C-alpha cells in the first residue's frame, strides 16, 4: 500500500521536527492530512498514556465514534479487547470494533518518541449483497430481537433497526437516547430497571430485566433486556452493550396458561387449585391477626334436573348466574371458587373471635341463600334454584386447612339431606335460612 506507507513515513518524520522547520512542516502537514483522510485504513496517534491525540477520518469510522469524541479518549475504551490483552509494539493483532467488524491492528513507535502510531485495517470479508443485509434486518424484526449499546458517560444510545418497533416507533423516526428509553419504560418498572443497570455497572454482573414499555399510542408491551458492561483501562464502566427482545406474546401466552390452570373456564372463578392456595393464605393471615376464617361449601339443589331436562346450555347458564350472584353478595376481601359440577365454595376472612358462632353462621347462611333464591330467567322460562350450605370456622372447628375442608364438606351433605335452602354449622343440626 504505497499511499499508506507514505503517510506513515510522513507522520513519523513530523514527530522529530525542530522549531526552524515548523513553517514548512505546517504546509506539509496539511498535504499529508489530506492524504491520510483519503485512506480506508485508520491511523491513530497515541500519547504516552495511550490516549488519542490525532486520527484520520477512517479511524473514527472504524472505531464507531464521532470524530469529536475520540481526542483524549483511551484507545482501550474504543477497543475493549485491549483492556484484557494489551497489544505490545510491532505485534499484529485481530480485534473487533464496536459493531463487531474484525480489524487488523498494528502499533509502531519511533525510538525515543513518546507518541505511538496505530494502524487499523479492515479485514477482508465477503461482500454482502443488499439482499443479504435486508434479510438480516428482517430476521431481527420477525424474531423480535435487536442489539443496543449505551455510552454511560454521554448517555449516547445506539439501537439496531428492530428495536425502534419494540418502542412503537418507525425506524429512525426518533433519535435514541437514554432519556427517551427511560420515558418509555412503564412508571411502575422504571426504578427496578434503573436499579438493575446500576447494579450491573457497579458489580460487573450481567444485566437481565423484564419490563413493560408504553408506546406512543398508549398500548403496553413487554421486553426482556440482557447486557453487560465494557470497562476502560482503569476498570471504570464506560459502556453497556446487549440485546433486547419483545416478549409480549410470551407474556400473554403465559397469562392465558395461568388462567386455564387456576380458573374454571365456564365461570371464570378460581378452581380447586387456586382455592386451596387462597385458603392456605387466609389461614396464615388469620393466625397473625388473631381472627376467624369461615369456609362455606355450597351445593345447588335441582341443578341435575335442569341439566337433564333442559340441556347442558341451560345448566351452564345456571352455573354462570350462580357465580355472578355469589360474587355480588360478598365483600371484596372474600373469595368464591367452583370446585366442579354444581359445587361452589366461599372463603370469608377477618371475622371477629368474640362473635358467637351461631350468630355468624346465621348471618352467612341467610346472606348466601338469599342471593341465590331469586328465580333465574332461562330460555325455557324462570327456574328457581335452592342451595345447601356447610359452614366450618377456623380455628374453632379445625386448626388446619385439610380438616377445615373436611368439616365444611360433611356439614354441607348434612344440610342437603335435611331439605332445600338449609345451612349447617359444623357439628350442629341443620338450620333453615330465613329468606323472607
Image (spheres, grey):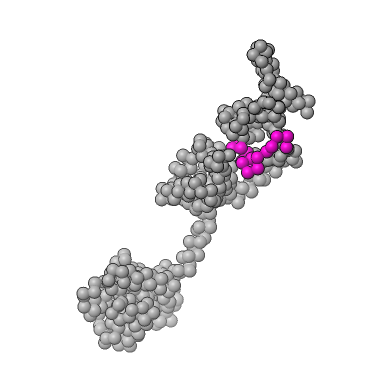
* Residue 383 horizontal side relative to residue 362, left or right: right
* Whole-percent x, y for residue 132 in the image: 70, 43
Residue 387 appearing in the image = no
* Whole-percent x, y for residue 213 in the image: 47, 48
Give whichever of 382, 174 is nearer the camera. Answer: 174
Q: Residue at x 68, y 20 (%)?
A: 16
* Whole-percent x, y for residue 328 in the image: 31, 67
Q: Residue 79 lies in magenta, yes or no?
A: yes
Residue 112 against residue 262 in the figure, above or below: above
Residue 153 against residue 379 in the figure, above or below: above
Image quarter in which the C terminus is found:
bottom left
* Residue 308 horizontal side relative to residue 122, left or right: left
Q: Residue 154 lies in magenta, yes or no?
A: no
Tell me the magenta residue range: 76-91
Residue 238 against residue 331 in the figure, above or below: above
For the image shown, how many numbered marks are present on the structure? 0
* Whole-percent x, y for residue 26 in the image: 65, 15
Q: Residue at x 43, y 81 (%)?
A: 308
Image quarter in which the N terminus is found:
top right
Amino acid at each position: 500500500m504505497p499511499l499508506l506507507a507514505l503517510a506513515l513515513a510522513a507522520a513519523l518524520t513530523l514527530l522529530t521536527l525542530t522549531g526552524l522547520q515548523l513553517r514548512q512542516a505546517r504546509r506539509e502537514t496539511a498535504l499529508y492530512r489530506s492524504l491520510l483522510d483519503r485512506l480506508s485504513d485508520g491511523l491513530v496517534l497515541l500519547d504516552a498514556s495511550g490516549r488519542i491525540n490525532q486520527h484520520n477520518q477512517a479511524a473514527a469510522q472504524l472505531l464507531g465514534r464521532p470524530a469529536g469524541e475520540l481526542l483524549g479518549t483511551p484507545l482501550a475504551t474504543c477497543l475493549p479487547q485491549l483492556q484484557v490483552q494489551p497489544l505490545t509494539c510491532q505485534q499484529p493483532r485481530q480485534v473487533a470494533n464496536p459493531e463487531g467488524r474484525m480489524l487488523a491492528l498494528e502499533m509502531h513507535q519511533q525510538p525515543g518518541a513518546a507518541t505511538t502510531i496505530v494502524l487499523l485495517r479492515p479485514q477482508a470479508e465477503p461482500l454482502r449483497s443488499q439482499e443479504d443485509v435486508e434479510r438480516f434486518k428482517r430476521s431481527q424484526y420477525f424474531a423480535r430481537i435487536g442489539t443496543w449499546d449505551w455510552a454511560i458517560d454521554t448517555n449516547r444510545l445506539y439501537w439496531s433497526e428492530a428495536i425502534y418497533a419494540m418502542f412503537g416507533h418507525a425506524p429512525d423516526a426518533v433519535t435514541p437516547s437514554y432519556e427517551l428509553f427511560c420515558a418509555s419504560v412503564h412508571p411502575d418498572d422504571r426504578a427496578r430497571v434503573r436499579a438493575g443497570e446500576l447494579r450491573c455497572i457497579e458489580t460487573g454482573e450481567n444485566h437481565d430485566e423484564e419490563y413493560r414499555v408504553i408506546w406512543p399510542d398508549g398500548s403496553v408491551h413487554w421486553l426482556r433486556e440482557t447486557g453487560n458492561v465494557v470497562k476502560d483501562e482503569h476498570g471504570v464502566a464506560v459502556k453497556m452493550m446487549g440485546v433486547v427482545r419483545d416478549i409480549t406474546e410470551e407474556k400473554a401466552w403465559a397469562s392465558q396458561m395461568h388462567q386455564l390452570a387456576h380458573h374454571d373456564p365456564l365461570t371464570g372463578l378460581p378452581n380447586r387449585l387456586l382455592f386451596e392456595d387462597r385458603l392456605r393464605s387466609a389461614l396464615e393471615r388469620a393466625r397473625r391477626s388473631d381472627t376467624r376464617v369461615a369456609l362455606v361449601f355450597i351445593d345447588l339443589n335441582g341443578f341435575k334436573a335442569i341439566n337433564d331436562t333442559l340441556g347442558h346450555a341451560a345448566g351452564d347458564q345456571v352455573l354462570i348466574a350462580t357465580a355472578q350472584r355469589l360474587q355480588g353478595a360478598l365483600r371484596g376481601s372474600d373469595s368464591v371458587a367452583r370446585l366442579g359440577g354444581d359445587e361452589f365454595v366461599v372463603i370469608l376472612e377477618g371475622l371477629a373471635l368474640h362473635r358467637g358462632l351461631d350468630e355468624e353462621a346465621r348471618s352467612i347462611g341467610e346472606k348466601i341463600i338469599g342471593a341465590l333464591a331469586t328465580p333465574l330467567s332461562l330460555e325455557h322460562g324462570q327456574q328457581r334454584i335452592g342451595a345447601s350450605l356447610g359452614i366450618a370456622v377456623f380455628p374453632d372447628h379445625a386448626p388446619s386447612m385439610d380438616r377445615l375442608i373436611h368439616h365444611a364438606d360433611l356439614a354441607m351433605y348434612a344440610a342437603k339431606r335435611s331439605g332445600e335452602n338449609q345451612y349447617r354449622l359444623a357439628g350442629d343440626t341443620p338450620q333453615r335460612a330465613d329468606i323472607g
